[in-house]
Image: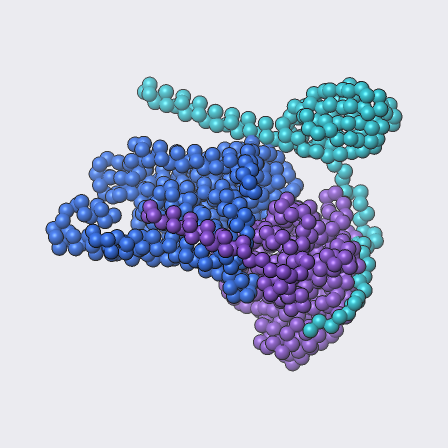
Amino acid sequence: MSGKYTVKRFLSENAVIITFIVITVIAIPSSQLSANYIIQEMITRLGRNSFLVLALLLPIYAGMGLNFGMSLGAMAGQVGLILAVNWRISGIEGLLFAALVGTPIAVVVGWICGSILNRAKGREMVTSYMLAFFINGIYQFVVLYVMGMVIPIRSPAILLSRGYGIRNTLNLESVRQSLDTAWMLTIGPFSVPVVTFLVIASLCLFIVWFKRTKLGQDMRAVGYDMVVAEAAGIPVDRTRAISIVVSTVLACLGQIIFLQNMGNMATYNAHDQTSFFAVAAILVGGASVKKASLPNVFIGVVLLHLLFVISPRAGQNFFGSAMIGEYFRQFIGYGAIALSLVLYASKARREAVRVREVQYGHGGGKKAAGEAR
Amino acid sequence: MNTKKKRLIVRATLVVAYVLAIAVVFVTGKEHTLLIDNMEVDEGRIAAFEEVLVSIDGRESVEYYADDRDMTVLKGQTHRIVIEDEISGTKVEREFKIPLDEDMVILYLPKVASGEEPYVERFVPLELESMPEDDGEIDTGFLSDPSPDAEVVP
Amino acid sequence: MKGLPKSAIVLLVVAFALSSTNVFAGPAYHIGICTETVSQAEDDLRGAEQLIKEYGAVSEGGIIQHITYPDDFMSQQETVISNLVALADDPLMKAIVTCNALPGVAEAYKRIRAKRPDILLLAALPAEDPLVIQKAADLVVDLDFVSRGYTIVWGAKQLGAETFVHISFPRHMSYETLGRRRAIMEAACNDLGLKFVFETAPDPTSDVGISGAQQFILEKVPQYLQKYGPKGEKVALFCTNDAQTEPLIQQIIASKNGIFVEPDTASPLMGFPGALGLDLSAEKGDFPAIVAKIEKAIVAKGASGRLGTWSYSTGFSLTAGMGELAKRVLDGKAKLTKVQDIYSAIGKYTPGAQWNGALYTDMSTGVKAKNELLVYMDTYVFGKGYLGSTKVKIPAKYALIKR
């Protein structure tokens, strides 16, 4: 390959990251926010969001694309938190309780989600997106009617005064930032939530380890080619379902970590954008629907959230209107997802053309096709 | 057959361990509201402290005077309280337990010092039913001065 | 891929260095105002712009720093909180006003207070539970949902209604204040001899969107009026959502027997200009002229004496009034929680209008909050004049109705 070709390819492969960095570099000075504030905000947001984004990795390995259904796990985590607040279980124990209660729920809904996605092979992303809306309806029903009517709720602070249903916003005072402050390291002007980062690090290690296990290898094989994997005796459907279950459980834990940092929970909406922002982050970090790695996660969280922090102010200072600043942020966030999906689609088409040329034009074999992937 | 049985046992153990873990965090993480009461008991049978320093679970001491009532939140069921009478200088140290299913309990300092059981009791919040039913109006504060310093808004 | 992060870091560091150099001489303090955008609550935004007109924007050396919430604030709590906390990054920031104080504001205020205890925190029209926001903010001002639950029904009766239709949806009913007001309205209907009906409409923040929810109201209101007033009996309608107010007013004006006492977020600009197709650009900010113009249009359409509202915009006067109050407090000319000072600051933007209100009383403990004031204004009925609802005596039992 010639040097020119490599540069072109490098640019096209990293178009999203490059676009983001360019916009960010332009926007930071005009946001007029102090470096201290921005860096602290990045540390906080890495701790808050990384776990959720990591939950997306396994389904990508299994060839199921971006798991928009992770908001199912988020809802399970929220049910756990509601119960922890209800029974007044505080501190780290409260979070553990929420995790222990949320996990079985996440496993069940994850398994349902996985089974449905197995019936919608090739359309996993849109199916999981719709599935999240469906489960959202069930969640709203459970939280608004079943809690207090069937599941006893004893804390008047979270119960609507009509006697059933949970209040619109839940104050998580008793578990607020208990993971973050368990060991808060102060470095200069910055505070670093060490335990949260340890949890994230151990999840990274888990993912690295998992990829080497038999199941992990099977997952990659399934993601690579389902027909070949099936022929090799790998239980394809089961493997795919497991990847979704693990992703859902991780999303459940991730949402608990996210919400303990936030300190309050929009009972009926907190999960709405969970999958969306996690997906945006991993795409901005340079991942695609088919390929993702740990660095993609962290680069993505930093870049996306850096832009989220500075763009409202930057837009405001650019255009002289507070409102436009806010729209600017949305435009960038959604634009990133659209851009990377479009780029991925056009790249896939180009690759397909190239593969065809290699196969038919030069009579090349499997090896070239494999590389193209 | 044997492996099946073995698997069943392992799975059952795991389920039991899981439930046990939930129970453990439930018990250790459970929060209780404690009202600390320094009022005389039974119309003067046990007098309230004039001035007393109270420390619970080794936290920083708080000073109370007669007729004080304070509220704090405790995690877990077994706690240690240290009471130091600032006038006589006597110090009492005791351990007390809060029942798991109580959300709010009240602790009577004079009873703790005299050692009379039970010094921790369930607290029943005052009912609002006794409020006036259909007489009078809502206290609507006072009517505002129409256009207090009426500057014309462009 | 390898070379990219390194060069990116260098670029970012340069950008950071540039960001901290922007220092200029200006006023002694800044006041941050956070409102919703035009699409959610235009009046609040105009209130903030009024303050900017008076005191100047920070970017031009003035004292007002105006920011807005994301449009889908419920699912973007992270942005709501971080945008507010970012205001406290300005060392000159001395007061922050939110109107509406949406969910997330209490948490943002907690974080700001932990970092900058010197900043005054004001919240108007809070969406969070009163006890939560009272603990986080220095001053909370809300509409008096208890009194209005009674006065709106009372107003409907004055205008001749026999049935009162309350239109809302589950998310709103999960708000403590809205849910309680509904119960108060139901009780008031019983006592005043009106029939109370609850109708469910779609939530505009759900998948149907704002246009779907508005379409629903357009189609349903004539059916409600037919159903509850088959022989032309007067039917009063009330809806809790701002976006649904415009189609509701439109259909009530077109009807013969519809009554509309006042919008939930009461304002002459709430729904009326859109429903009547009025161009109010000439009257911008001049509320008496706006009211006169709307009145003329309503009378011309033969709906005189059937529709009412407050003669000034709630969002506009509270946003501007809270900003003004913060400024007066920082100048040492007013005390933050003194009721007369609060009325006086809001009154600057509502000359001639009558306000009434009370301190918030918690239902379960009976504790009267020292920093939450509930306010309401007299209802102005087009073609008829003020109803006098601020002078109505409200039986005390309504304050104790739960749900």
The quarter holding residue B37 reads top right
**Which scheme is used to colour this image of the protein?**
by chain
User: In the rendering, at what x and y percent does residue C39 appear?
Assistant: 55, 64
User: In the rendering, at what x and y percent does residue A131 appear?
Assistant: 42, 49
The chain letter corresponding to blue is: A
User: In the rendering, at what x and y percent does residue C97 appear?
Assistant: 65, 56
Residue C331 in view in this figure: yes
Taking the view exactly as shown, the residue that stands out farthest to the bottom is C300
Taking the view exactly as shown, the residue that stands out farthest to the right is B44
| Front residue of A216 and A108 | A216
| Front residue of A48 and C141 | A48
Residue A162 in view in this figure: no
Say left or right for A300 vs B97: left
Say left or right for C204 vs B5: right
Image height of A200 relative to A119, above or below:
above
The quarter holding residue B111 reads top right
Q: What residue is rendered at 71% in x and 65% in y?
A: C156
User: In the rendering, at what x and y percent does residue A102 appear?
Assistant: 49, 37
| Front residue of A302 and B70 | A302
Q: Exactly how many numbered labels are in the figure?
A: 0
Say left or right for A6 vs C142: left
Q: What residue is rendered at 51% in x and 47% in y?
A: A39
Q: What residue is rendered at 38% in x and 47% in y?
A: C6
Q: What residue is rendered at 63% in x and 60% in y?
A: C25
The chain letter corresponding to purple is: C
Image height of B71 relative to C307, above or below:
above
The chain letter corresponding to cyan is: B
